[in-house]
Amino acid sequence: MSRTRSRTAPLDPACVAAVDLARSAIEETVGPDQVGEHLGVEGEGERVVTHYFACLDHAYRGWRWAVTVARASRARNVTVSEVVLLPGAGALLPPEWVPWSERLRPGDLGVGDLLPTAADDDRLAPGFTETADDSERQMIFEYGLGRARVLSPIGRDRAVRRWHSGESGPHTPLAHAAPAQCSTCGFYWPLAGALGTGFGVCTNEYAPDDGRVVAADHGCGAHSEAAVLPHQVEPTSPILDDLAYDHLPEDSPEADLAGSADLAGSVEDTDTEPLGHS
């Protein structure tokens, strides 16, 4: 069995010697203050080589200038083919490009925006798969009734993981501080279908998740069975100032005289008018 050997074209001496030509091509493009030392040469093909120069621009650290020169067959003059700026080892590069459909996040879609769904989106399945009866499935498929596509098992599992790990799931400070889970709340309305076993909609207008899908093991302080216990106030004995009052027995003559004096004083205060009034 014979092996195919790749033959490397030899470097053209005239192209290798065209260092000054390559440098002048860069200087004409960006100026002489942007070109550094000559880093080397690399063969691209027959009578075609690329010269590399250091880039002195502070915004492109680690990058290098690449000037490709060539010489035609039986020609003496070397000409410049292209001048480009290429990243070298340790160069700062932009992040890998991501399609716009993968950069979208919840809340990015605004009024009037359209978000087309791909025909092969694995979150959706043909509409006839929504029914379980084979005869109904065949009829819907033939006559084109119902929805064109419905939620697939993959799309359902993604929604379950997203909802359960989100703000309406059980792993939030709001749910940890709740008196009970949403599954035992009277305002919890379970979803229909397979998702109803673990998710529902909150219908309490005072709850933070009103009108949103919540997990059955989520919870908040607006639970229908939450009760506020009244604060019990323990009775305390009155505090008496022993320095200002004398304790007298109720049946003693002194107590009767003190009570009569207090009554007389209160009557005199009522009948006396303040000074300065006629």
Image (cartoon, helix red, strand yellow):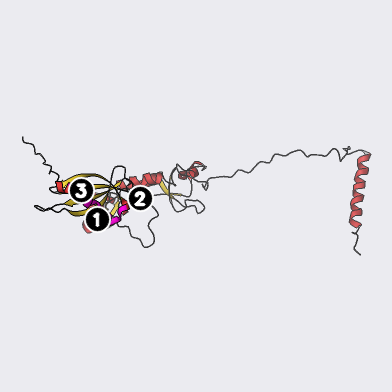
The label nearer to you, 1 versus 3, is: 3
- Helix, strand or loop at label 2? It is helix
- Helix, strand or loop at label 1? It is helix
**How far apart are the two marked residues, 1 and 3, measured between alpha carbons?**
65 Å
Left or right: residue 213 versus residue 39 is: right
- Label 3, on which residue? 50
Up the image or down, 146 lies above or below 222; here it is below
Q: Amino acid at mark 3?
A: Thr
Secondary structure mostly seen in magenta is: helix
* Closest to the observer, 270 or 59: 59
Q: Position of residue 115 (x, y in %)?
A: 32, 57
Q: Which mark is residue 170?
A: none
Q: Which residues are magenta?
A: 16-32
Q: In which quadrant of the rendered view does residue 24 lie?
A: bottom left
Q: Say if residue 136 shows up in the picture.
A: no
Q: Which badge, 1 or 2, comes first in the chain's sequence?
A: 2
Q: Position of residue 134 (x, y in %)?
A: 23, 49
Query: The C terminus appears in which quarter of the rendering?
Result: bottom right
Q: Residue furthest bottom?
A: 278
- Label 2, on which residue? 59
